[in-house]
Image (cartoon, rainbow, N blue to C red):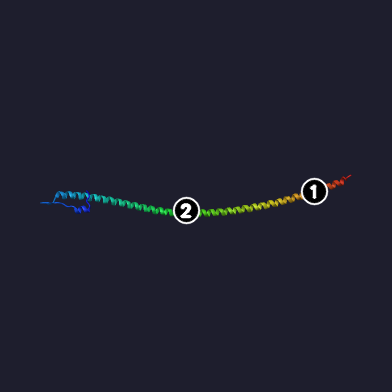
């Protein structure tokens, strides 16, 4: 039986005629009060242990939370750095590609000009060869006409 403070304040112990309070009743009451207080002390001790354990757990989770927050900040910073590096690298790649493309186009234009010049040179040589050949053939025709006059 658990006595509350109200129960204890209402508790009435009968007096016996010669001895004062009934010793058996007081002894039984004391045994029950001792049992209640012992149980209450044990419960208080268990609850204090649980509170201590829970406080330790809370501290542990707070440390974990701080660690996770720090990790998240580091991860965000790292992600921003990676993104910035990637953007810079992409920019450099595009710039290099543009420079290479311009060089390729310039080289192709130069090569086209060289080919055009070579074509013109060969064309002139062919034209010159044709004129010389025509002149040679004409000269031979003139020689043949002189050797064999027409009848």
Q: Which residue is mark 1?
A: 134
Drawn side of residue 131 relative to residue 110, left or right? right
Residue 18 visible (yes or no): no
Q: Secondary structure at mark 1?
A: helix
Q: Position of residue 108 (x, y in %)?
A: 64, 52
Q: How busy is the neighbourhood of tag 1: few (under 14 within 10 Å), some, or many (20 plus)? A: few
Residue drawn at x 80%, y 48% as measured from the top left: 134
Measure the C-alpha gap from mark 2 to mark 1: 80 Å
Residue farthest left in this picture: 18
Residue drawn at x 39%, y 53% as measured from the top left: 65
Mark 2 or 1, nearer chain start: 2
Q: Which residue is mark 2?
A: 79
Drawn side of residue 69 relative to residue 147, left or right? left
Q: Nearer the viewer, mark 2 or mark 1?
A: 2
Q: How busy is the neighbourhood of tag 2: few (under 14 within 10 Å), some, or many (20 plus)? A: few
Residue drawn at x 56%, y 53% as measured from the top left: 94
Which of these two is toward me, 42 or 127?
42
Residue drawn at x 83%, y 47% as measured from the top left: 141
Residue farthest right in this picture: 151
Drawn side of residue 49 relative to residue 85, left or right? left
Drawn side of residue 125 relative to residue 56, left or right? right
């Amino acid at each position: 039986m658990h006595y509350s403070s109200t129960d204890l304040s209402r508790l009435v112990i009968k007096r016996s005629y010669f001895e004062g309070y009934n010793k058996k009743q007081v002894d039984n009451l004391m045994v029950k009060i001792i049992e209640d207080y012992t149980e209450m002390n044990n419960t208080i001790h268990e609850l204090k242990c649980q509170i201590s354990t829970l406080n330790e757990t809370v501290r542990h989770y707070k440390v974990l939370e701080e660690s996770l927050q720090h990790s998240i900040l580091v991860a965000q910073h790292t992600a921003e750095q990676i993104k910035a590096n990637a953007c810079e690298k992409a920019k450099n790649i595009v710039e290099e590609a543009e420079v290479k493309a311009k060089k390729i186009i310039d080289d192709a234009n130069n090569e086209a000009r060289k080919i055009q010049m070579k074509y013109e040179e060969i064309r002139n040589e062919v034209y010159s060869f044709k004129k010389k050949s025509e002149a040679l053939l004409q000269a031979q025709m003139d020689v043949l006409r002189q050797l064999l006059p027409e009848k």
